[in-house]
Image (tube, rainbow, N blue to C red):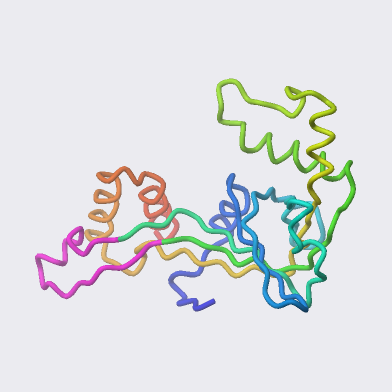
Amino acid sequence: MYMPAHFAAGPEAIRSLLTRPGAANLVTMTSQGLLATLLPFAYDPSVGEHGALHAHVARNNTQWSEPAIGESLMIIQGADAYISPSWYASKAEHGRVVPTWNYSTAHVYGTLVVHDDPEWVAGQVRRLTGINEAAFDHPWSVEDAPERYVEGQLRAIVGLELVITRIEAKAKLSQNRPDADIEGVVAGLSARGLVESAADVERARADGD
């Protein structure tokens, strides 16, 4: 990953990317070439030295049954947004500004472990559901569905675990701009309803102070 020093994500930014509800692209090199699937995931910090990402895939998806060659990769994407130069205070001062794109991302590398085990998969599905339902007023749980139906659904998926070996993470959030420009970016993003991106910029500025 191209990584200017001022955009390197710190520990808190990395933890946020790993623990926020979301999905990541799993990329594996196989004898059939590169395979990729977008998968919701849950982070388990208790596994190995760096933790693990837990997910599941449809049994009919051949990515799980094609042995991965070397490290596998899961690409986690945080909020991202177009940044207009019209938001910069420096536009009025000298005009030497151009558009850019703000984003946060983590490239999580590791060893891929397949769990073709109903008990492991059931636990992963329950945990993943709990993470994503937590913000609902009336959270849905696996127990809300008929037991035989759930058993059938579980037979149709296979568990995947990426045991993390290393992480490369980047937070490109206007840290290279003067304070007045950053304030303009936050205001511009907020006005467009991009509150998560605006909050990320504010958080990056606070971390840099």
**Residue 192 % position (x, y):** 27, 46
Rendering quarter of residue 71: bottom right
Residue drawn at the location 90% of the way across and 48% of the way down: 117
Residue drawn at the location 88% of the way across and 52% of the way down: 116
Q: Is residue 112 left or right of residue 135?
A: right
Please state, as top left, top right, bottom left or bottom right, where the N terminus lies in the image.
bottom right
**Residue 184 % position (x, y):** 23, 55
Q: Which residues are magenta?
A: 83-102
**Residue 97 % position (x, y):** 20, 72
Please state, as top left, top right, bottom left or bottom right, where the C terminus lies in the image.
bottom left
Total numbered badges shown on the rendered structure? 0
Residue drawn at the location 75% of the way across and 36% of the way down: 126
| Residue 109, magenta (yes or no) | no
Rendering quarter of residue 137: top right
Q: Is residue 113 left or right of residue 94?
A: right
* Residue in front for this viewpoint, 115 or 63: 63
**Residue 119 % position (x, y):** 89, 41
* Residue in front for this viewpoint, 61 or 55: 61
Q: Relative to 119, is 206 above or below?
A: below
Identity of the residue furthest to the front in this view: 60
Rendering quarter of residue 146: top right
Q: Is residue 202 left or right of residue 184?
A: right
